[in-house]
Image (cartoon, rainbow, N blue to C red):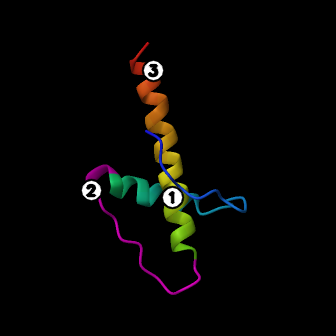
């Protein structure tokens, strides 16, 4: 499943708890809203979660096709 996500211009450091929380919410819902003040990294977090989810999906699809 190829996603058209923008390339990350910097490394993603920390926020593993937030990533896990968003991923857990996505297990039960197709849409999750991230809310917070401007500049706290909502978009960056969403892009990282989407990228990670896409990679996991691709790996699982490849494993099932073998």
Q: Secondary structure at mark 1?
A: helix
Query: What label sits on residue 29 in the rendered view?
Result: 2
**Circle 3 residue:** 63
User: How far from the left and from the top, in percent, is residue 48?
Assistant: 55, 57
Please name which of the two marks, 1 or 2, marks the residue nearer to the observer: 2
Q: Label 1 vs label 2: CA separation? A: 15 Å
Q: Residues within 10 Å of mark 1 (few under 14, many from 20)?
A: some
- Identify the mark nearer the N-term, 1 or 3: 1
Going by the image, does 40 lie left or right of 9? left
Evaluate whether residue 4 shows in this view: yes
Query: What label sits on residue 19 in the rendered view?
Result: 1
Residue 30 drawn in magenta = yes
What's drawn in magenta, residue-wise?
Answer: 27-40
Q: Residue at x 53, y 55 (%)?
A: 5
Q: Residue furthest top?
A: 66
Going by the image, does 11 lie left or right of 7? right
Q: Secondary structure at mark 3?
A: helix
Q: Secondary structure at mark 2?
A: loop
Q: Residues within 10 Å of mark 3 (few under 14, many from 20)?
A: few
- Identify the mark nearer the N-term, 3 or 2: 2
Image quarter of the C terminus: top left
User: How far from the left and from the top, in percent, is residue 1?
Assistant: 43, 38
Q: Label 3 vs label 2: CA separation? A: 24 Å
Looking at the picture, tell me which residue is in the foreground, 26 or 43.
43
Instruction: Place residue 57 in its image quadrant.
Output: top left
User: How far from the left and from the top, in percent, is residue 55?
Assistant: 52, 40
Q: Residue at x 52, y 70 (%)?
A: 43
Instruction: Place residue 32 in its image quadrant.
Output: bottom left
């Amino acid at each position: 499943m190829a996603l058209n996500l923008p390339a990350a211009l910097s490394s993603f450091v920390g926020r593993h708890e937030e990533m896990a929380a968003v991923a857990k919410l996505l297990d039960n819902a197709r849409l999750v809203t991230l809310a917070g003040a401007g500049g706290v990294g909502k978009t960056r977090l969403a892009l990282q979660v989407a990228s990670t989810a896409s990679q996991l999906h691709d790996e699982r699809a490849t494993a099932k096709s073998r």
